[in-house]
Amino acid sequence: MFEDKERKEIESIGKYPLIQKLSEKIELSHAETLCGINEDASAVTVAEGVIFNASRLFMEYVHFDLTYFPLRHLGYKCAAAAMSDLLAMNVIPTHLRINIAVSNRFSVEAMEELMTGVRMCCHRYKVDIVGLDVGSSRTGMAISVDTFGTAKDEEMVKRGGAGEKELICVSGDLGAAYAGLLILEREKQVFEVNPEMQPDLSGYDYLLERQLKPEPRLDIINALKEKAIKPTSMTNVDEGLAGALAKICNASDKGCVIYENKLPIDTLTFNTLKELKIVATTVALSGGEDYELLFTLKQEDYEKIKTIENISVIGYMQEKSAGENLITNDEMMVELKTMGR
Amino acid sequence: MFEDKERKEIESIGKYPLIQKLSEKIELSHAETLCGINEDASAVTVAEGVIFNASRLFMEYVHFDLTYFPLRHLGYKCAAAAMSDLLAMNVIPTHLRINIAVSNRFSVEAMEELMTGVRMCCHRYKVDIVGLDVGSSRTGMAISVDTFGTAKDEEMVKRGGAGEKELICVSGDLGAAYAGLLILEREKQVFEVNPEMQPDLSGYDYLLERQLKPEPRLDIINALKEKAIKPTSMTNVDEGLAGALAKICNASDKGCVIYENKLPIDTLTFNTLKELKIVATTVALSGGEDYELLFTLKQEDYEKIKTIENISVIGYMQEKSAGENLITNDEMMVELKTMGR
């Protein structure tokens, strides 16, 4: 947990001065933002179009373990995860609101660390923080984040638009965040047995970064827009590829086939999981927190998509009755339901 | 707590079937609503104007005690409280999103009760539920609600617009919700000492209703609009009148004076608090959860406001240097800071 050198208790300054203090460093970058934190609601000017909203609730002990999760990273991750839900509808997030419930085991400095992370992520992705509230918790910490942005109706991409024979694509690589979590959990156990031991996290940088500080894939959405590619369906890969595929297949009333040898798995992820005696494909299918984008494309977009980095074509859509299947490396066909869910 | 006759475990049906089940009874009433619960984000068509967003995070043991809080009422209250934040900016809420984190001590039926309450409130106020997620908690229940609506720029009322000599008005009456809480806490203690005793809540109906099932003051906003009255400043009375007044005074850079004999306190509230040996004025000033609207008006609006039911004029704004004061029933002037905060 965050080590306080000079610890100031939240109670000693009070709720509103704390919110004021946390707000001071927030910079707004959108001219459309009329007001935020110091009003009962935030207000943002919008043009005629569609407003998109997403919300996430993060609970201590379920979504994060503060024994190894630095608060600054936690703030960054909560913001990034919420943004990724808007991106998954082909919408660029512009505004974010955050509510934090904490017990008195957290200091003012700890809250500042958390908000520094939120601010860093929002600054990087040009998202204005227009809501910030801090309340009490008698149990663990809870963080709720909601984010919104606008787009034109025709830009919206839903889960249900995939057609037969269309290409299934996924951004980035899969399983790294889960592998990072396993490494952190392993070192936590070592530490619990022997608190004198320093955690050995060297060599796992990429996995830890994917777990502790994921990036929303704004780059992918921008690249697709640049090439004038509009996915026919899309969703966020936040609970494993199999679950994300099921969302697209169910909503589109279609089946799919994907190839194990096409799944994008980073070498470090693969080797680390092997070391832990876990099959990387299983983690890619049913791990979690990748925050990558899964989408389908018309076949004629293949030439265009090939030129974009960090996108893998992993299979294609088919008729519903054909099911949702994985072709393994040894050319067996396995139902995804038995693998990943 | 909610008594389960036939208890179905959440685990036994799984997250997505549970969300599906809870979603089935949700009816959407706005043609602008394009999609909601079954996508990564909700989408709502908007005209050119301003979008207003508010969010609240409710934590078990802090905001509600399930030993006496029926889940249906809890759902209603969470929705009502979030809506009241938009109303406090003179904006009518049209959409709401909810995320719930629960442990396995809750059943599917318990979740249905909670959502029935949310649905009832949303149905009553014509608010579409466009987000619903259920996640895990290892500690208490947490509920996050965010709500939004649009308005024209010129309709927005902020905290900072109050001018000197303007009238200070408050809707409804104050302190009832807190008095209701005290009664519930008293009966809980009786029950804890002797579980055979049935709680004696008769005669306290109004107080219990204000605590367990508050109503957002859409009626007041509509009445003001009908009479073409636009408050110069406004805020939600959710943590006592003194706190709400401070928000308006600080944002407007003004002082104020209010009269104890003008504070709207229901007779039952007054008598119950007297029975509990608590001064009603103190509760009105620093109680909580009234969800009434505090606003300021230009003096020329006085004739118009007089004709609206459930609005009390309780004092007036003054220059900042004069401070924030209460004139007591025995005509003493007391600084509000020492009374209510």
Image (cartoon, coloured by chain):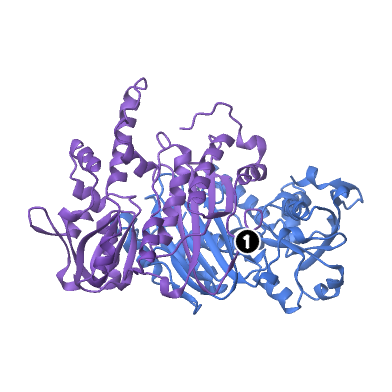
Chain colours: A blue, B purple
Say which chain tag 1 marks. Answer: A
Q: Residue A61: x, y in percent?
A: 53, 46
Q: What element does badge 1 sit on?
A: helix
Crowd tier of the residue under label 1, counting other residues whose Cα lies within 10 Å: few below 14, some 14–19, many 20 or above: many
Asked whether, in this view, residue A340 is left or right of residue A219, the answer is right
Taking the spot 66% from the left edge, 34% from the top edge, the residue there is B12
Quadrant of the image for the N terminus of chain B? top left
Q: In this view, does A98 lie above or below A128?
A: above
Front-most of residues B340 and A144: B340
Q: Is residue B133 above or below residue B189?
A: below
Front-most of residues A151 and A215: A151
Front-most of residues B263 and B38: B263
Quadrant of the image for the C terminus of chain B? bottom left
Q: Residue A28: x, y in percent?
A: 47, 75
**So how many labels did they put on this image?**
1
Task: Please indicate, yes or no, whether residue B138 appears anywhere in the rendered image.
Answer: no
Residue annotated with mark 1: A85
Taking the spot 67% from the left edge, 52% from the top edge, the residue there is A239
Q: Residue B28: x, y in percent?
A: 59, 53
Q: Residue A316: x, y in percent?
A: 85, 59
Task: Please indicate, yes or no, whether residue A200 appears anywhere in the rendered image.
Answer: yes
Asked whether, in this view, residue A296 is left or right of residue A291, the answer is right
Return the residue found at the far right: A331
Amino acid at dot 1:
Asp
